[in-house]
Image (cartoon, helix red, strand yellow):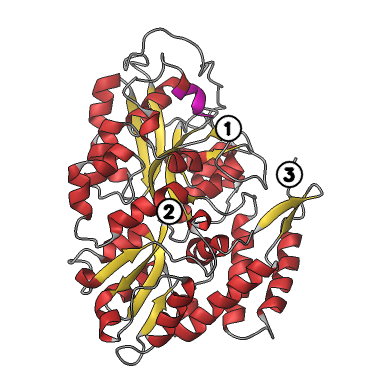
Amino acid sequence: MLKKRTKKAIACIMAVLTVGSLAGCGQGEESTQSTSDASADTGEFDWKMCDGQTINILFNEHQYVTPIIEKLGEFEDLTGIKVNHTTIPESNYFDKVSTLLNAKSDELDIFMTGPYQIWEYAKAGYMEDLQPYIDNASKTSEDFDVEDFYPSILNSARWDGVEGHEMGEGSLWGLPMGFESTILVYNKRIFEEHGIEEPKTLEDVYEAAKALQGHSGENTYGMALRGELGWGTIITSYETIYSMWGAKDFEIQDGKLVSCVNSPEAVEMTDWYVKLIQDGGSPTWASATWSSCGGELGAGTAAMMIDATNNVFSQTIPENAAEAENLVTIPIPLPEGKTEDDRVAQLYTWSLAMNSASSHKDAAWLFLQYFSGKEYQNEASVSAKIVNTPRQSSFEQDSYQELLKNSVGFVDTFEATVDTTKMLYIPESYFFEVSQTWCQTLQDLVEGKYSSTQEGMDDLKEKLDEIVSHVDVS
């Protein structure tokens, strides 16, 4: 999850190379739009309704994909559909997806997407709305049970296509394969040795991090946070706390998208965050990554970490981390004066989506519903250790609870945060440039390059307003 991803890549010059890389695909002939009507009544549902058809799928290398590939034979036997698939590294995954979608190639039927790519692809008309398929009993098995998805997680792929409008409403552009929230984990051994209690507020978090700086000698520190230059530094712990503080990143004013990063709430929160890093963070914070934060927590170098759930969970597995048995997971405490109504957590999810140019939409929909259905999800969530699973039945099954039982506080934290876990960042098509610029300002603030946090955030607002000045919010 939340590892560094490529920026938008629309290099049409790569189209021929990319199309040719899909296993079993043709030579890039012009696509033919499917005449399939998602709302058409085709009679009683039948898994064999597309018997003999072939679909092409492009996967990103990810733990979510392994159990799908293992089950492809069963899907082909059930449906009679031939599945061609290619799996490529994340470093150039979205380059290839973008090229195929931009070319309106029908040689890509299904692909994986994150929420940020939806803002580009859906707005451009490259994605198929899946809600009409779900609503059509002749195309969707009664066993699919869409109500079994956690609503907040399913809705994370809903959007009305207007930049500046929050996600959560509108067309459904994907079905979640799994998701991650943003939570806090601390080392109870280190806390007990230094007489520090579990933090109840963010002020407690700061004081604990400060007190634990150098807790076990040189280079040990209080709080692990991502700091490398990139979107992941902004969109995880920072964005979650920023939102709980009551700050906004963007809003529409007088028909234009404008930045709100220099509001009183934004400045106050950022000032707190900068001091947390300066007084209780890693001495090499500016280069800290997903993996380095997790590794230093697991080794006992860091006493706390705020990061994505998969990073937290992996460090609670004894074979992964020396301090696994000492780690306790909790929701991120609220700022002073805030209530549970203010609690939110930033989400990231991989979803399966359909190319709107596909000539085999019904066959693609059968694939999507099979590999997001209850039977598959219940099995894959355990076999692939998917943290977190998007379905309630998967989470509640005994075998999944067994998977989580040794991760102290993890289940309680999940239950306390799942309903308010969502995409907090306001959709806009310059996300990667915006987040890079924001992260650079955060690094500059930590390094003391501005006379005050207010000065830094005022400067950032000017930069972000210029970046999004051409965004269409109509």
For the magenta stretch, what is the residue range?
Answer: 129-134
* Label 1 or label 3, whichever comes before in sequence order: 1
* Label 1 or label 2, whichever comes before in sequence order: 2
- Quadrant in the picture for the C terminus: top right
Identify the residue under disc 2: 90
Q: Quadrant of residue 249?
A: bottom right
Q: Position of residue 169 (x, y in %)?
A: 57, 37
Q: Position of residue 70 (x, y in %)?
A: 23, 38
Label 3: how many Cα within 10 Å (few below 14, some 14–19, many 20+) = some
**Three-letter residue code for mark 2:** Glu
Q: Position of residue 74 (x, y in %)?
A: 23, 28
Q: Secondary structure at mark 3?
A: loop
Residue 473's label in the rendered image is: 3
**Three-letter residue code for mark 1:** Lys
Label 1: how many Cα within 10 Å (few below 14, some 14–19, many 20+) = many
What is the spatial separation of the Cα atoms under label 1 and label 2, in whole angstroms? Answer: 22 Å
